[in-house]
Image: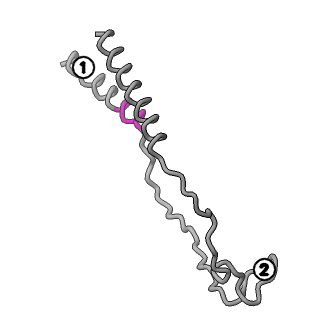
């Protein structure tokens, strides 16, 4: 069993190394320039922009408030449910012994 797993892992590693070498050898390098002409207007600041201040024409964000609802429900945890289950089993066995 261990030999089979070792053989499978070694085959997968070998195939991974072969695939990596093949990918590197087949890869082509673009000889052209890497930088293209950029549109300066696409990255320009909006008119009236000042450092540290947002433009006045931007819409104001909507303020979201969190309202908490008050419930008088007691939070039930798994520990409470398990203790209740054990108590019911204990009370059933106690009642069956007294009858």
Within 10 Å of disc 1 (Cα), the crowding (few <14, some 14-19, many 20+) is: few
Where is residue 5? Give x, y as percent.
Answer: 32, 16
Residue closest to the far front: 31
Of 45 and 32, the residue lying toward us = 32
- Residue 53 - label: 2
Residue at point 29%, 29% (across, down) = 88
Q: Residue at x 80, y 82 (%)?
A: 50
Name the quadrant of the N terminus.
top left
Q: Please tell me whether residue 67 is drawn above or below residue 7 in the rendered image.
A: below
| Residue at image coords 64%, 75% | 38
What numbered label is drawn on residue 93?
Answer: 1
Dot placed on the residue nearer the N-terminal end, 2 or 1: 2
Q: Quadrant of the C terminus?
A: top left
Return the residue nearer the eye: 44 or 25: 25
The secondary structure that most of the magenta stretch takes on is: helix
The spot of residue 94 in percent (x, y) is: 27, 19
Q: Which residues are magenta?
A: 78-84
| In the foreground, 83 or 17 | 17
79 is within the stretch colored magenta: yes
> Residue 66: image x %, image y %?
56, 67
Report which quarter residue 90 is drawn in.
top left
């Amino acid at each position: 069993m261990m030999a089979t797993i070792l053989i499978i892992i070694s085959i997968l590693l070998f195939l991974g190394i072969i695939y990596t070498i093949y990918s590197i050898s087949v890869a082509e390098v673009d000889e052209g320039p890497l930088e293209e002409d950029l549109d300066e207007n696409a990255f320009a600041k909006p008119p009236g922009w000042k450092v540290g201040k947002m433009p006045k024409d931007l819409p104001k964000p909507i303020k979201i408030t969190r309202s908490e609802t008050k419930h008088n429900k007691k939070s039930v945890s798994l520990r409470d449910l398990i203790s209740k289950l054990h108590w019911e089993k204990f009370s059933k066995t106690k009642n069956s012994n007294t009858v």
